[in-house]
Amino acid sequence: MRFIEDVEKVRTRARQQVSEGAVTPTLQTDSDRNCAVLNEALATELICILRYQFHYHMAAGIHSAAVKSEFKEHWTAEQHHADMIAERIRQLGGKPDFAPEALRKSHTEYNEGHSLEEMITEDLVAERIVIMTYAEMIRHFGQKDPTTRRMLEEILADEEEHADDLADLLYSVNPSSGKPTERLTATEAVKPIRRNGAHARKTTRRR
Ligand SMILES: [Fe+2]
Ligand SMILES: [Fe+2]
């Protein structure tokens, strides 16, 4: 017996509404709602790109080289995520929202931080937020839209790796015990940020 019993019916349905491209009746979901969910993810990725870019350009101090390369690697990954999400929104018949005001939908915040340690911490918090919100979205799409679910699962795996990388930057590990020992010396102050003519607070070393 064939797995698809009524192939003719499938062929007929495929010919109907050809202009909808990848959207077929097998997507048992509300396309508008799904695009809205994905646009929240897109806004979140865009905020993450901006925050990582800011951190990359502002990172200074003796430990900044390794941290800067990590920031750049993450911002490139977030850019890839944003492109994947935008492409999927378009495939679903929606419009990826790149309008600056749409950034308010982001789940994460644009927090600058005043030292390398604060920057890494802000990025780690943001990664932990997206790990939770992507897990929620994966549950939302479930079996109803497996392609979007798989895309989100792929992104989630990257975000978990990012969080792990950032935690490694914040804490040194004793190689003999495998236990965290002390915070890395990532507390050098960054250049004060000029805003509205005033200098932002300059963080002092905490050691
Ligand atoms: Fe991302
Ligand atoms: Fe990330």
Image (cartoon, rainbow, N blue to C red):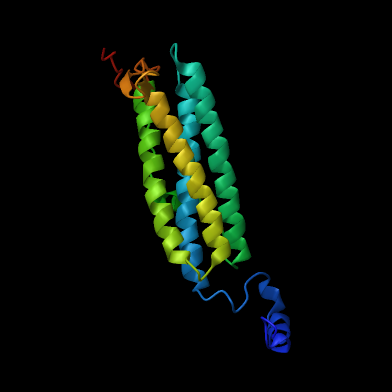
Left or right: 107, with 75 as reference point: left
Query: Picture coordinates of residue 55 (x, y %)?
Result: 45, 28
Q: Residue at x 73, y 88 (%)?
A: 8
Q: Residue furthest left?
A: 206
Residue 160 vs 104, above or below: the answer is above
Report the front residue among 71 and 193. 71
Quarter location, residue 127:
top left
Query: Picture coordinates of residue 86 (x, y %)?
Result: 58, 55
Report the front residue among 22 and 50. 22
Could you tell me which quadrant the C terminus lies in? Answer: top left
Query: Picture coordinates of residue 90 (x, y %)?
Result: 61, 62
Could you tell me which quadrant the N terminus lies in? Answer: bottom right
Residue 27 vs 100, above or below: the answer is below
Q: How many marks?
A: 0
Residue 61 visible in the current orientation: yes
Residue 107 visible in the current orientation: no
Q: Residue at x 55, y 58 (%)?
A: 150
Left or right: 21, with 43 as reference point: right
Residue 109 vs 59, above or below: the answer is below
Q: Residue at x 54, y 24 (%)?
A: 69
Query: Picture coordinates of residue 120 (x, y %)?
Result: 39, 28
